[in-house]
Image (tube, grey):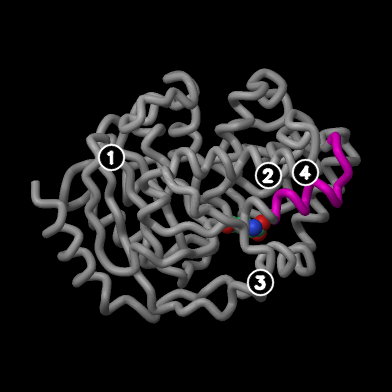
Amino acid sequence: MDLNAILNEINHEIRPLLGQGKVADYIPALATVDPGQFGMVVTTNDGQIYAVGDAEQKFSIQSISKVFSFTLALKADPDALCRRVWREPSGNPFNSLIQLEYEAGIPRNPFINAGAIVVTDSLISHFGGQDQALSALITFIKETADTPDIEMDHKVAISEMHHGYKNISSANLMKSFGNIHNEVDTVVRTYFHHCSVTMTARELARSLLYLSHHGTDPLTGTQHITPAQTKQINSLMLTCGHYNASGDFAYRVGLPGKSGVGGGIIAVVPGKMTLAVFSPALNEYGNSFIGTQALDLFTTKTGFSIF
Ligand code: GLN
């Protein structure tokens, strides 16, 4: 199958849609991103790279970072984590507080904000502090992306610190139930910083190859997690990776995927390849409008869905 031709076709078909959707302006530092960008990359398990559009543009990976933080937390202490975060779709927006109180401070899954904040808290405890947790995360991303060129954008993290009222509320609420072990301020600061990592679509697609190859990087041979843990992460991405649009994403794309409000979406074709798309204008659920459409076109044209 000629994947270059397919990506070019998709690029052509989505162009008329550019202009629809809206960039995430609830984080002021992201409000000025050019909404007219689109990039898409496929990386196969044997190392072929197919790219179209703005594939080399760095962008804020935001909630896609939850895949990396959850991977590290699963490696560190899977049993404790299972008691502190459930594995069910929430059916609610990514920053919703509504279930947290009547479910006693246990978030529905690690990919909504509250769940990722608990994951971040567990990493701070495991690695012995905020700086150590962030440094472990960045080291992991650099290793999987196979590049030293990975950084956090402090301007974006600080911007979120000043406007992340709901995240700070949910951390406080969970702390009141005993499900946050470190200081709330430290935990949300660390969470905002890991969300602020910037990467290109090319780097993202490369970095997720361990999820399409049973936990082992197919190009370096490094085992990051077990095949069972890989199954768990992919399953959670399929059922919970797009918040209250997870069902719609599964219906349209048919792949495990994870979005971020920076406009990125990653997806995994187990055993074959990974995909990353970038287009900053979002739909009403906070997922890239064109990115979702591009992945829908990809699996429809190629048949590379898991179903
Ligand atoms: N940092 C963002 C937040 O906490 C991440 C949300 C997202 O990408 N969906 O609101």
> In this figure, which residue is indicated by the disc labeled 2?
134
Q: Secondary structure at mark 2?
A: helix
**Splitting the image into 4 quarters, where does residue 264 fall?**
bottom left
The reply to whether discs 2 and 4 touch (Cβ–Cβ < 8 Å) is yes
> In this figure, which residue is indicated by the disc labeled 4?
130
Specify the amino acid type for callout 2: Leu
Q: Nearer the viewer, mark 2 or mark 1?
A: 2
Q: Which mark is residue 273?
A: 1
Q: Nearer the viewer, mark 1 or mark 4?
A: 4
Residue 34, x across and y down, in percent? 46, 79
Q: Nearer the viewer, mark 3 or mark 4?
A: 4
Q: Earlier in the sequence, mark 1 or mark 4?
A: 4
Rendered view: 262 above or below 120: below
Q: Mark 2 to mark 1: distance in Å? A: 28 Å
Q: Which of 207 and 7 lies nearest the eye of the viewer?
A: 207
**Dot 4 crowding, Cα within 10 Å, few <14, some 14–19, many 20+:** many
Residues in magenta? 181-192
Q: Which mark is residue 26?
A: 3
Specify the amino acid type for callout 1: Met
Q: Earlier in the sequence, mark 3 or mark 1?
A: 3
Residue 235, x across and y down, in percent? 45, 32
